[in-house]
Amino acid sequence: MSTSTDLHDLGVAELAEQLRARKVSAVETAQHFLARARANAGLGAFLDFNEEATLAQARSADAALAAGTPGAALLGVPVAHKDIFVTRDFAATAGSKMLDGYRSPFDATVVARLAEQGAVTLGKLNCDEFAMGSANENSAFGPVKNPWDQTRVPGGSSGGSAAAVAARLVPAATGTDTGGSIRQPASFCGITGIKPTYGRASRYGMVAFASSLDQAGPLARSAEDCALLLSAMCGPDLDRDSTSLDVPAENFARTLDDSLAGLRIGVPAEFFGEGLDADVRAAVDAALKEYEKLGAKLVPITLPRTELSIPVYYVIAPAEASSNLSRFDGVKFGHRAGQYSDLIDMYKKTRSQGFGDEVKRRIMIGTYVLSHGYYDAYYLQAQKIRRMIADDFQLAFKQCDLIAGPVAPTVAWKLGDKSDDPLASYLADIFTLPASLAGLPGMSIPVGFGAGNMPVGMQLIANYLQESRLLNAAHRLQQASDWHLAKPEGF
Amino acid sequence: MNTGKSALVHGYEVVIGFETHAQLSTRSKIFSRASTAFGAEPNTQACAVDLALPGTLPVMNKGAVERAIEFGLAVGSHIAPRSIFARKNYFYPDLPKGYQISQFEIPVVQGGQIEFFLAGERRSVRLVRAHLEEDAGKSLHEDFVGQTGIDLNRAGTPLLEIVTEPDMRSSEEAVAYAKELHKIVTWIGICDGNMQEGSFRCDANVSVRKPGAPLGTRREIKNLNSFKFMQQAIDFEVRWQIERIEDGHAIEQATVLFNPDTGETRAMRSKEDAADYRYFPDPDLPPLVIADEWVQRVRDAMTELPRVMAQRFQADYGLTEYDATVLTQSRTMAAYFEAAAKASGQPKLASNWIMGELARRLNAGEIDIAESPANAQQLAQLIVRIVDGTISNNAAKQVLDALWSREGSDVDQLIEAKGLKQLNDTGALDRIIDGVLAANPKNVEEYRGGNSKALNALVGQIMKASQGKANPQQVNELLRKKMG
Amino acid sequence: MNEKYLMPLTSTDIDRIANLARLELSPPESERMLTQINGFFDLVEKMRAVDTTGLQPLAHPVACWQDVVLRLREDAVSESDDRAANQRNAPSVERGLFLVPKVIE
């Protein structure tokens, strides 16, 4: 019987095994992590708990475990959900005042799928408001702190998810990635995260930010754990999500141990230019050398429109967001202003009170680029360049099997550094945006440390539906190195 | 294109285009699985998707697409093999998402035309397009003080928006168009056409100009849901615009509402930025692809259209164009006629009886022919008995009355029970005629003297003497023979 | 088409857009927004200069790799009355109706 202090050091796979072997119960496990989460409230990672619901789920899991129910891979494993996913038994704020107190009558499909596999919901995680941000400083409920250095940001928008997993307050968490919001916080917090191919995971129940970009994915401390969660999260949701791909659910863990001999890893010149900090470059280069040792071959490639991905993304995403957020009008649900003179005043006050600055900014940009006379020059133009970017990747994939590079130009910055300079924040998304625009699967794996002893992540991008290949490459690297085993002090 | 001419109004040409919203008769909504049934308690048919709850997404209803294809085929349009759904963004309490999912640049149905008769002349109105979109909810203004109540049951009901070119030149023509469109959508079964329930709503774009001048600025009269009001509203609007122009004012583009109580149109409160809908393709909905095979399947399964059926009635049954058009005013009437015509072998008589005696009774009772107490078989039997001389026309009317009031359901039994059989025994008739002639020498003389009216009095007497049972045709024949 | 020279935004533009988006910005907010958005659009100008003649927009990302078409579901009702749960979060409800300030047409 393991001592309970070891529980939070176990990964998902190991924990699931221990639960199956009845070495520890689901209730014990849940209580253990709840206590840790509450004890570390200072990180700001969690927004909501519902102990009753959590323990009820844990008890069900224990019953199933006792009965030896086969098939449920995550039975009794605690998972926390980014507050972008609506949940029946927990708050669903999307990090916004607009949805403070909102209780959804249904669960997001991804949440339900994990529950079907026996996962126990530990709580809801903080995030940038409506998933808009790269530092989790845009939450209406306070910032999240990076467990490696609490004066720094954890990244965003899934900052709560990344911080909670890094601090081992939960073995795994769900996040969403629209322009890098899983990959970048995973990188800043020294953990593993993956965004699948667009359409692999259902968007039903994910509060919409940018519909043609949003994707759900897991954050955990290893590729193996991510594979377990991703397998549960992905799969067609044909009845509810018209953009869900009609592609069978896959066991992404099946080929984790495959050899990497002959794997061609493309290294885009544009990802290693001037803007990349030396410490990040060094860590990524070291990891690439490890890949060569594992039998992979590095191939120089070009993704010529990398820089253009910034304006393209920041035209398309706000445009879609401006429309998706119109439903927040104080009529059917959510915040409504206390005082107003008439209907239009009610709308304006409600929305101005309910939305934070970054959200308002993006709504304004989005409204503008769609407005009469500007649509062709901005939105349509951006969607055309988007095609060019996607085509660039297809050309590149003729020469390589995976593409590797940094996740972000720097390590995590200090809280407050970029909060007054949204543009600086946008520019830092340069490496994650291209794969988002093309809808390709992308991963972040920890590859050591940089300035200020902060974690550095490496990004791997694969072609459509090739998540197994990503996870296999990540797993093999993690077997041959120990960067992913590092823990922040004090947790 | 229109070949007919319409009268000018005070020297101005009237130009009208229509946008009609027809609610499609699907069971569930266009993007959600809630019911579209009318009359439910508020918000009991508005599911999470209809309410735009966070995280909800649209999923397309095949039945709505199929009905759009049926419409397109019925009016001779092009069915787009690939069409796009777009978001039309604006804020209104009955629009839960803050945008309406509609079609903008590439609609599912393109082109087509509607043909109809106006005062005996054939007219044709060109369609620009028809597209699929979702209906908004309902606002109830009257029930709350200073507030409006929103019912989202209707939100998400599938609509087909049918847009015409500005081809109409009078309010009569516009109403005739609307009636024909109404007939088509109800005939092919894609819309229940219940205007009181809001299943068929018309917006009329109206402008005036001096003949030969460029198009005038149009105003849009919204939500006309009765043919009577349609005509009144357009007439008022035309007069109003002409007066304004004559007074030296320019017409400003506006959306107007018709007030049936005052008979006037009035501009709605101006919506400053209403025109900027920021249309863009809905990222939640990939392109709608309609394969040729599907269109072919729909075409093969389609019911015979009214105009085609009318032509067939003219060819096969020798009906006039007018009669054929009247009899194809609805599926039920056409079916009734055809059944009665075939069963009796007397299409012309069937047509006369339906358009005459039956129509009168149906109108008085405000019922559709499908609810007629006298069915097609019974009418056919009645006609057979007239033709074979068993009963006279008058007697037949009495039998029809009896059927209508459900005194009985068997024509022959009713004839027997009411003793309505004509006197066909020529011998007996002969004797009666002789008797009457003998008793009325003066009339006989007058008739022989050239006064054909004197015949009527004799006929009357003979009918009376036979207690109405004499066959009037036979009486006439015999009388003429006898009197020379 | 892409030759049109688009001026930087003015505060009138900010007002118009805010109104369209039903947002209310205080004067300092408005000013800040103007500066930030104009800064952003400097970045966007590079994008506008790209020659995209003949290209189709990529609205659905995976469409560049496989044809993405709209799935159609059977016309069947499977949502029943769940009004209580659905209206649980409503700011103002009476007799089953959502209440808003009176709408004047």
Image (cartoon, rainbow, N blue to C red):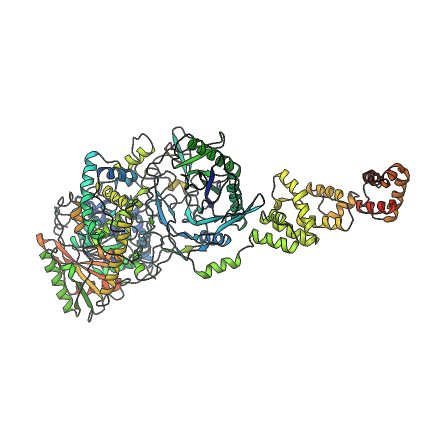
Does residue A24 appear in this view? no
Q: Nearer the viewer, residue A32 or B45?
A: B45
Q: Nearer the viewer, residue A459 or A6?
A: A459
Work out which residue is located at the far right of the displayed protein and give it.
B438
Image coordinates for residue A384, horizontal then vertical, percent: 27, 55
Decide if residue A356 is on the left or right side of residue B427.
left
Image coordinates for residue A250, horizontal then vertical, percent: 31, 62
Work out which residue is located at the far front of the displayed protein and give it.
B212
Q: Quadrant of residue B286?
A: bottom left
Q: Nearer the viewer, residue A326 or C35?
A: C35
In the image, residue A20 sits, relative to residue B233, either above or below, namely: below
Image coordinates for residue A361, horizontal then vertical, percent: 23, 42
In the image, residue A213 sits, relative to residue B414, either above or below, namely: below
* Residue that appears at 13% across and 53% down: A411
Decide if residue A366 is on the left or right side of residue B331.
left
Image coordinates for residue B227, horizontal then vertical, percent: 52, 39
Decide if residue C57 is on the left or right side of residue B389.
left
Q: Quadrant of residue B98?
A: top left
Q: Nearer the viewer, residue B263 or B337?
A: B263
Q: Which quadrant: the C terminus of chain C?
A: top left
Q: Quadrant of residue C13?
A: top left
Does residue A226 appear in this view? yes
Report the number of discs.
0
